[in-house]
Amino acid sequence: MPNHDWLPASVRAKASERKLKSGAALFRQGDRPVSFYEIVTGRVRLSRVDRAGREVVLYVAGPGETIAEASLFSTVYHCDAIAGSAATLRAFPKAALLAAFDKDRKAAQAFTATLARQVMNLRTRLEQRNIRSARDRVRHYLGVHAGADGRSVTLRGTLKDFAAELGLTHEALYRTLAGMARGGEIRRDRGKITLLRAPKV
């Protein structure tokens, strides 16, 4: 789970709790940013709607992760944030955090490092989305996200969330996972996928 100990005590003291029902919007694209958020429980889906009216999922964030960091430096939110399940969030006021950064250089540097890691993760996701084969896209994800044993990947949400993160329809993901399991490449357990041999990416 990400560590947010760098958040100044003055900002933590001003945090408030938000509870969302599944499907409720935390904010919408174009809204004025007032906070950034840490997810305590549940999942929040960051998405945009394309010109054809289809939702394009940018990321599904889970417990311990923060969202809307970049909006601290913007006049509007750049995507929708929708609860993918019942969720509890901690809201940190934008004004308080920016004021703290002016006074606390170490906190500002730590926040910059957090954004840098997010950029690296985004590049990995873009690389993943550019892989045409659904099977190779799944292999790439499993190879990147395998745990300490190099084999096990714990899914952070539902298979539909997993499909959205990969940029696949859930039907395509189901077919791909079933084929990989039949071929002896993976084993599926509840909430976990285990690689039975090294992925061919």
Image: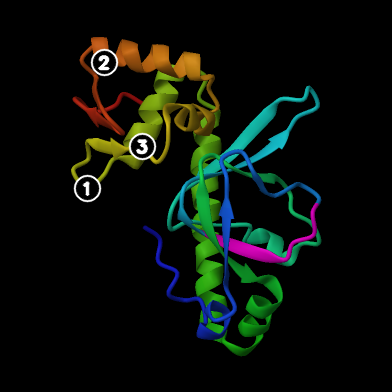
Q: Amino acid at mark 1?
A: Ala
Indicate whether 44 appears above or below 106: above
The boundaries of the magenta stretch are: 31-38
Q: Amino acid at mark 2?
A: Ala
Q: Where is residue 10, by image quadrant?
A: bottom right
Q: Secondary structure at mark 1?
A: loop
Residue where numbered disc 3 is placed: 155
User: Closest to the observer: 153 or 89?
Assistant: 89
CA gap, disc 2 to disc 3?
16 Å
- Label 1 Cα neighbours within 10 Å, binned few <14 / some 14-19 / many ≥20: few
Q: Nearer the viewer, mark 1 or mark 3?
A: 3
Give whichever of discs 1 and 3 has the lower sequence position: 1
**x and y percentages locating residue 42 in the rendered image:** 46, 47
User: Closest to the observer: 135 or 23?
Assistant: 23
- Label 3 Cα neighbours within 10 Å, binned few <14 / some 14-19 / many ≥20: some
Q: List the single residue furthest toward the bottom.
A: 103
Q: Which mark is residue 181?
A: 2
Is residue 137 one of those drawn in magenta? no
What residue is rendered at 71% in x and 76% in y?
95
Q: Secondary structure at mark 2?
A: helix
Give whichever of discs 2 and 3 has the lower sequence position: 3
Give whichever of discs 1 and 2 has the lower sequence position: 1
Residue where numbered disc 1 is placed: 148
Indicate whether 25 appears above or below 56: below
Q: How many marks?
A: 3
CA gap, disc 1 to disc 3?
15 Å
Q: Secondary structure at mark 3?
A: loop
Q: Which mark is residue 10?
A: none
- Is residue 158 in view from this perspective? yes
